[in-house]
Image (cartoon, rainbow, N blue to C red):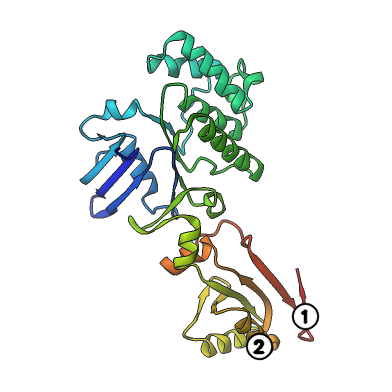
Amino acid sequence: MSAAVAVEALVKRYGRTVALDGVSFAVAAGEMFALLGPNGAGKSTLLHILCTLLKQDGGSARIAGIEVRDNPLGARKHLGVVFQEPSLDVRLTLWENLEFHGLVYGVPLSVRRARMEEMLHLVELWDWRQALVRTLSTGMKRRLEIARALIHDSSILCLDEPTVGLDAQSRERIWNYLAQLREKRGITLLVTTHYIEEVEPCDRICVIDRGRILAEGSPAALKAAHGKAFLRVIGRDEAAEADLLAQYESRASRHGADILIESSGNAFVESFLAANAGRIKRLSVEEPSLETVFLSLTGRELRDQAAGARERTFQFGKQGGEHTR
């Protein structure tokens, strides 16, 4: 049985800039697969090729076994798409937007109406069905776009940064809807994001940066293979930070205002604290996570918030004492 999505040695160039450099991966039917990387990594370009909006310069991209470059209309029949930029007609009502989409895809009236009602209930917009789209919040519009993408008989849902610009509550709701969709309809989900905390529930994650695949696997497998523990340190002053960088040269690097020092376990943390408490203003212990996976693979951070979820923080007072937050 062919994969729901299959990409082989995919290349895309914009002039001299290589956006995708030989990208390959496959997504099984019913799988939740995430492309994780910073802005400019090539995620949107890849999704636009899969959605038949761009043509690749080399390699192959197949949707449900159909080569998208050779048969874009055939590929589109299997796809539901939520783009990063809004694409709703704000002059129409929610109901009219869904109705128009169903008509474009040739969904029979009885099926169309039943599915419109089902999807509006799922994304909690039924009571707003006669409202003009322009009156909706950003989060409500994104939920409507998800509903619209599934009015036709799509088996693969592609979402490009579906929660960008949304507040934390709206982001959580979007992911809840996606989980329900997957459970009810068995659809394949292909998601791009730069929010690391959002990809934990995914079956597999593909880490992409500068147009290349750096690693692929389940969250647990990626953490086991590439995750590391780090101490994130802010020194008491510039002289103290210079001493720390010199002392731990082989495992330390500066990232913005912080110094990151690779840790080898609790014993290392205890010895570090005993030897350097007087030099430190603030220290946090970051356990192996997808954040540290990305840091290990790229030497850079992919960080939306100042502190990770699995982080112990110590604040040091003037007398060298400490308290835990």
Within-10-Å neighbours for mark 1: few <14, some 14–19, many 20+: some
Mark number, residue 276:
2
Q: Earlier in the sequence, mark 2 or mark 1?
A: 2
283 left or right of 249? right
**Residue at 49% over, 22% down:** 89
Q: Secondary structure at mark 1?
A: loop
Residue nearest the observer in this picture, 101 or 154: 154
Amino acid marked by disc 2? Asn
Q: Nearer the viewer, mark 2 or mark 1?
A: 2
279 left or right of 69? right
Q: Which residue is mark 1?
A: 317
Q: Quadrant of residue 154?
A: top left
Please say whether residue 57 is visible from this viewpoint. no
Q: What is the quadrant of the N terminus in the image?
A: top left
**Residue at 36% over, 50% down:** 42
Where 218 sits versus 265, above or below?
Answer: above
